[in-house]
Amino acid sequence: MKEHQTVIGLSGNPNCGKTTMFNALTGSHQHVGNWPGVTVETKMGHARVGGEGAGEEIDIVDLPGTYSLTAYSEEEKAARNFLIETRPAAIIDVLNADALERNLYLAVQILELGVPLVLALNMMDEVRRHGKDIDARLLTELTGCPAIETVARSGKGKQELLEAAYALATTRAGRWEPLVISYGPDLDPVLSEMEPIIEAAGLMAGTVPPRWVGIKYLEGDTSVIRRCREADPEASAKLEALAAKVAAHLTKTLRASSDAIIADYRYGFIAGITKRVVRYPKVDEERIRLSDRMDMVLTHQLAGPVVMALIIYLVYILTFKAGKVPMEAVQGAFTWLGKTAEAAMPPGLLRSLVVSGIIAGVGGVLGFVPLIMIMFFLIAALEDSGYVARMAYMLDRVFRIFGLHGTSVLPFIVAGGIAGGCAVPGVMAARALRSPKEKLATVLVTPFMTCGAKVPVFLMLAAAFFPGAEAGVMSLVTLTAWVAALLVAKLLRATVVKGPSTPFVMELPPYRTPTLSGLCIHTWERSWDYMRKAGTTILAISVLLWAAMTFPGLPADRASAFDARENAVQGQIDAAKTQGQESPELADALKQLAAERSEEALKASAAGRAGVALESMSRLAGFNWRVNIALVGGLAAKEVIVSTLGTAYSLGEVDTKDAEPLSRLLAADPTFPKAAALALIIFVILYAPCSVTIVTMARETSWKWAAFAMGFNTALAFVAAVAVFQAARLFT
Amino acid sequence: MNQCLTLRQAQVNQKLRICSVGAQGELGRRIRDMGLIPGAEVTVVGKAPLKDPVALRLRDFTLTLRNSEADHITVELLAAEPAGTAVKS
């Protein structure tokens, strides 16, 4: 961030259209950044004010969506820290004008800090459709904040909004003008008593209004109190005593807590404004809104779950049917690229590196990009339409049984609850969970879900062993992942992550048609993340694995033994030729020899040795050493499993260098029966998350828990795979 | 005035006014953040397939909460739906 530039923050409730507004304001000029002291990723973008050329560039920061500025979730802490630490020149609070009263609750809290504030009366189209009327000019007058009518979806009012924010930032020039709300005859005197103490002690380094700090003491805001206690224990003790005294008094006289009184007065203040500003239609009251009518079916006690199952199934069908053609095209392109490179380069180590290491490795990942893009697009549509909240609503009762939260459905789905997500954003989506315990349990089991990188493994195994039933296998795999995640979550919540459940109180936003541009930005962001992973981490790992599978190679005596045998056969062929005879069985023998040689070479490589060493144990689950190598590779990134298996098999069989599908090879491998395929599916569902996910988990929780996930998941996966293999062998 | 009952006991489509919010700490704050404060008018508009959580309609928006959370909120009955005769302030 450049210091001289004007920074404007974008705040607002969840579902108020804030992200849409951010996209409308910044267009494509945005990137993800991390602000100091904030673990939640914050998006930044640029916009211009004052017309092309003549104007100024301003930075816009998209704050996480929150209902309030208390600090009991990561999002709220992030938003609040941004206001206090970064001190933006102005804040644009995006309000869902259709629910103005509740949306002003956050605005009032920002005003109590004193940050220059502009109100974006967003979704004015919905307001009008509902027959309501909002007097923006009066709102401006009553709050002292410029109020601009906007419709983020169509970009209406966005330039006026920017100009208003910039103008306010310029006139206020960093000055904070805190709003003072009366908190009634019990709390106001206490606040007056607190203010001089706070001011004298210079608590919060004098960066925020003293009255605001006082309110935080009354609200029992642990994060502010802890900070003040560290700065000045004596002053803090005085304030805490004052807060405790009035709290005891309120409990006795009004049977209410201080924070309840504060909320009542805040809402009272807001109601005083909205009563004058918002005009409701007289007849609308009884008219049932379209969204509520839709809910009568979509969250109906019987129809709801049926529709939900149908929608999830539809997502599958759409993804696989629509994704088939582009996926085959991309894979075809990489096959062609591999062949071209092979033809253009002389045989040797370099060609092997380019063809088997780089092109095959990256191609294996990119081949699934079309599939992943469609999947991401559909998930984004479900999220933006408001349906995911309904899923959480309908599923909460079930999730709670397993010690999770209805909102856990979101991380699960993003991570691949609807196959094809990614555990990395999935783990990050768990931030929406307010309880550390439920969040931890969710984070730990989220990687079980069928992420986009695991999909190829299952598809390949399904094509090999259950041809024609791929969709069925995928559905079963996804179901298994869910069952495993829920059961393991229950286990964790009963053992290592014990604790009571947290509030579910959650908004059911009205159904909205997602905007195409919003969906495309969403899809692109997630897909690009995946591709970037393919281009960097996975390329490096692919090359590393190629090296591990190539070096140190055959010992000299074995190599010369193979040379001798090949020469002998070649001699026989030549002898036959001179007699004018074709000898197919001799040519086959030569090929057979070459295959044996490459297989032995791979076995002698570093990876092969590791795979062979593990084989004595992995045989219990039916895994041969090739599978072992692939699974070890999968620790780095799941995308690597298929490409490694492909490399392992194609290096081992010379006559299949024409890129025969791996499925056919596996199906034909006598050392890899159907039972082993089932065991492999179970193992891949359960075993340790990929390296990127591990890093993300460590960032979201701690390295201790990330390490726990690696060890525990792998042990669990092995036990389950052995059980499945041994059981399946009895029946096949 | 009607007698206050807990929100869990409320039937779907009954019009209600909140008497009190007894929840403390985080739950209380979360409930209040969403505008569920004494005096607010709500309607139970639905229950999840397993009867829990419930969906509440406030004047401008819909939210959900669990029965165990609804236990902390007491409400009074305003008028029965769907007669269409309910009077709004």
Image (tube, grey):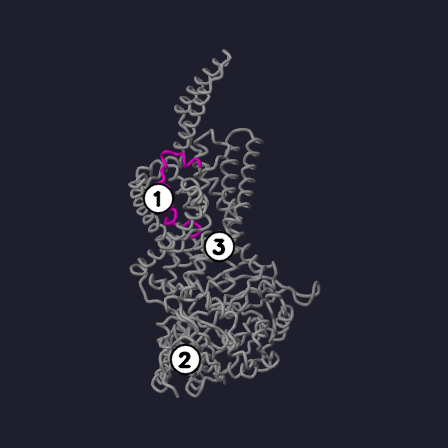
- The amino acid type of the residue labelled 2 equals Ala
Q: In whole angstroms, how far apart are the C-alphas of marks 1 and 3?
A: 27 Å
Give left or right: position of A725 versus A297. Answer: left
Q: Secondary structure at mark 2?
A: helix
Q: Quadrant of the N terminus of chain A?
A: bottom right
Mark 2 Cα-neighbour bin, 10 Å: few <14, some 14–19, many ≥20: many
Of tags 2 and 1, the one toward the viewer is 1
| Chain ID at mark 2 | A
Q: Quadrant of the C terminus of chain A?
A: top left
The magenta segment is A664-693
Q: Quadrant of residue A678?
A: top left
Q: Residue furthest top?
A: A579
* Closer to the camera in the image, A732 or A574: A732
Q: Which residue is mark 3?
A: A315
Whole-percent x, y for residue A721 in the image: 33, 45
| Chain ID at mark 1 | A
Of tags 1 and 3, the one toward the viewer is 3
Q: Is residue A697 magenta?
A: no
Tell me which label, 2 or 3, sits earlier in the chain. Answer: 2
* Closer to the camera in the image, A275 or A174: A275
- The amino acid type of the residue labelled 3 equals Val
Q: Which residue is mark 1?
A: A679
Q: Residue furthest front?
A: B83
* Closer to the camera in the image, A105 or A553: A105
Whole-percent x, y for residue A71 in the image: 43, 70
Of tags 2 and 3, the one toward the viewer is 3
Q: Which residue is mark 2?
A: A260
